[in-house]
Amino acid sequence: MSSNYSAKDIEILEGLEAVRLRPGMYIGSTGKTGLHHLLWEILDNAIDEAMNGFASHIQVTLHSDGQSMTVSDDGRGIPVDEHPVAKESVLQVILTRLHAGGKFNNNNYKTAGGLHGVGSSVVNALSIDFKVHVERDGGIFEQRYSQGIPQTKVTRVGNSRLTGTTIFFRPDPEIFPETTFEPDLIRERLEIKAYLLNGLEITWNDHVNNTRDTFRFSGGLTDLVAHLIESGKTEKIHGDFFTMSRDDEQGRFNVALCWCDVTREVTQSFVNAIPTPDGGTHEQAMRDGVQRALKAYMDAHALIPRNVTVAAEDIREGLFSAISLFISNPQFQGQTKGRLGNVDIRTWISNAVKNELDAFLTSHPKASQVIAEKVVIAAKARQASKQAALNVMTQSVRTSRKLNLPGKLAECSSNNPAECELFLVEGDSAGGSAKQGRDRRIQAILPLRGKVLNAETAGSGKVGQNKELCDIANALGCALGKDCTLDHLRYHKVILLADADSDGHHISTLLLTFFYRHLRPLIEAGCVYIGQPPLFRVDIGKKTYWVLDEKERDALLKKNHKKIEDVQISRFKGLGEMMPQTLYETTLNPATRRLLRVEIAQGDEEITESVVSELMGRDPEPRFRFIMTHADEAENLDF
Ligand code: 1YM
């Protein structure tokens, strides 16, 4: 560092200060996930070095206090010579500047993802103690930091003929409420990385539990699938695994799979060596390729009995698979960014898997026979009951339609549309409570931000381009307007959930206008509902009641007038205020909630039409007239 404090130094300090002020922006949170994110960042830099072919061994050590870590690799070592522009050591540039790193190059897909080399400066800024040790150019170099501020210069402390980088860091307790690392979480991640990076040796030293493991797999994904089979306590039904890899201008990927003696399907997918637990386009494309290859093989060899039809899920029964994809522009979606969204890679992966699996099936006739028999048994079992067949049919519709789901949709796990419900929830905070409080099996949540577009004044073109409204249609599995059918409907109930105030009513009205104009078959089929959250909580003695409105509250008080001295009444300002559990009990739980079904009054279709167009239309005059005529019917106006 130059001796006088230059504008450049101030800029750097401001950069790292920004990280300390808003750590969540850089590492997601300051909770357990954020704490471990620090480790993943440093680890990913070491892994990048291995993926680029320069490192073959990585050591990760959790120190005995459980609150500090060391990661080292035997790569080239971070450069220590003077940066030509910054006029200070490249090492210091890397550790103090937010966007320093030689890895932004977009053509280079060989990056572990994460923050792409930005990571080390972020970890440095958020550590109370940070030491870097580099062996390179015949020397050993060291430097120490605290909270991102250099405590020493980059100093040559000895000679070495080896090369590599070692980083020690202790997360800053001023930033992280909890600074204890979780050994199991780390161990699992390291093991997975070793499966994905064939031949890389990762040593895990856990000085809290005094254990040491070395992970090194030469079989790559095959070893991972074998591990899944072993921990799933099952066995392959055929000899060889199917494996394949592709490496071309789109990126590269590996697949390993086999069929096992169970009915469930087990899949693990990764992008740039990062797990995608919620799947995505790569996982779906692999499945698609598998299904097409097997179906084609069975058709060509007349392996499907006359009275049997094979469905996609018959093929997937017992399928154990893994896909690891490396691409330069991964787009992660979903609440926890656990799903890949890139559509450009779909055909590439699906066709490659289809072609390679075609060849595998042809060259392994015995295995193909056994797999085909299993598929036929699955298909027969499915067809055995008409009801089951019906369920399964809708199931396959549901899964194949999952491709375009909006990122913020919290999906339910059931695949049977008849029991599934979609809640459209106003606001992120209410959306969050609903996600936590819901019955994950059958209830999906789509949070909506603020007022949606007024479909009455916007015109079909604008509606078709509106993300929020298209998200709703995509989640439901319906097209808009005259193309809207219920054939692929993914939920048989869609429930609007807004606060019981004027803003909430406005949003419900806008949504109903959208449904009425563009998704009318849903209303006609009786699938659209309005949720009714309670307005009051009334505690009488030890008992709690949730009541819908003033009328109900007064009735309740009248009935309990004897115990009236022991009464507490509170009014909810909004759904976001309710604890998830309370929201479930009062508003989501099918057994106790109250819903209004939206209907177009029989024989009054014309009236409905004119009310919608007048009240939601561009011309304010009819709205004014309506308000003036109906003003005396209104109660509880909320301004
Ligand atoms: C324990 C963490 O960070 N290893 C590491 C980082 C780098 C290199 C080698 C490296 C990269 C390159 C050239 C390059 C980094 N270098 C840079 C930068 N382990 C760990 N090992 N020489 C060495 O990418 O061209 C950023 S990270 F920017 F200096 F090149």
Image (tube, rainbow, N blue to C red):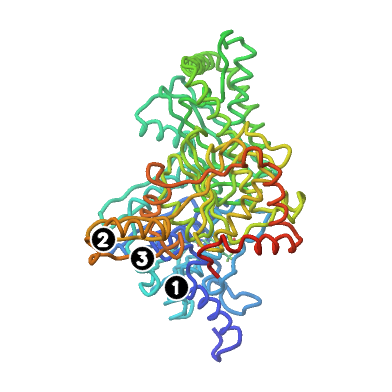
Report the mark closest to the observer, 1 or 2.
Answer: 2
Q: Considering the numbered disc 3 on the image, is that residue within a helix, a strand or a loop?
A: strand
Amino acid type at mark 3 = Ser
Quarter of the image with the C terminus in it: bottom right
Q: Tell whether circle 1 marks a residue whose Cβ is less than 8 angstroms from ligand 1.
A: no
Q: Where's residue 621, x and y in %?
A: 75, 63
- At x 70%, y 62%, the residue is 625
Q: Report which residue position mark 3 lands on.
A: 570
Tell me the CA gap for discs 1 and 2.
77 Å
Q: Report which residue position mark 1 lands on.
A: 142
Amino acid type at mark 2 = His
Q: Where's residue 164, x and y in %?
A: 48, 61
**Left or right: where does residue 207 sit relative to residue 614?**
left
Q: Where's residue 167, x and y in %?
A: 43, 65
- At x 64%, y 57%, the residue is 452
- Mark earlier in primary sequence (3, 1): 1
Amino acid type at mark 1 = Glu
